[in-house]
Amino acid sequence: MDFGDILNQWDKQEKAKNSQKKTAVQKPVPVSRKKANADFIQNAGKVVETEKASAKNNQNPTINPMELWLRRYGVTDKDAIAESSEEASLMKSREYISKMRPEARIDLHGNTRDEAWARLESFVNDAVKRGLKKIEIVHGKGIHSTGSDPVLGPMVRTFIEQNKHLGVSGHNDRNHGGSGATWVLIK
């Protein structure tokens, strides 16, 4: 028996199967009631009951398999999943940037409020033009200020809040200036 004989025999079997299918009365394909993800399915009992009730009402039930599957298992919102993963990656990158060293630093010690504001504006504009991600502003703790309250610390916070290029900010740890220095992420 060679390959041609095997092929002829197979063709005869296929023709016999096709002729049997044409002569037989077509019946609806039975739908399996087995649940693959039982813990994922919510209200599975209700869905099966409604399917059985609809099958009893119709003598010849024709259920769209895709509709049946969607009724049983529901639809996953992939857009919401993508948004949450995008936010998570953004938060990871912000954590990374907040831990990285500042790319530029300005020291405002000895300046008045107006001088410090002008220097800060030019410094931030320059940092934005250079494409920096993180800067450090050293303003001091205000221990040597004349009067009772520090001047530059609150002024720097106000500047950060009002400037459209500046984003998240925070104070350095004790080893790098503590509350006398502020790091800022540039948007």
Image (cartoon, rainbow, N blue to C red):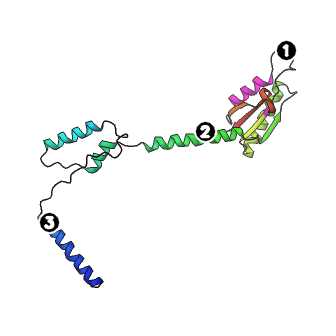
Which mark's residue is nearer the viewer, 1 or 2? 2
Would residue 116 appear left or right of 67 to someone viewing this image?
right
**Residue 187 visible, this orientation:** no
- Residue placed under numbered mark 1 in the picture: 147
- Residue located 51% across and 41% down the image: 83
* 14 left or right, relative to 59: right
Asked if residue 142 can be seen in this view, the reply is yes
Which is nearer the N-term, disc 1 or disc 2?
2
Dot 2 crowding, Cα within 10 Å, few <14, some 14–19, many 20+: few
Write down the quadrant of residue 124 in the picture.
top right
What crowding class fits label 1: few (fewer than 14 Cα within 10 Å), some (14-19), or many (20 or more)? few
Q: Nearer the viewer, residue 164 or 139?
A: 139
Instruction: Classify 22 as above or below 32.
Output: below
Q: Determine whether the residue tagged by mark 1 lies in a helix, strand or loop.
A: loop
Q: Which mark is residue 91?
A: 2
Q: Residue furthest top?
A: 148
Element type where label 3 sits in the image? helix
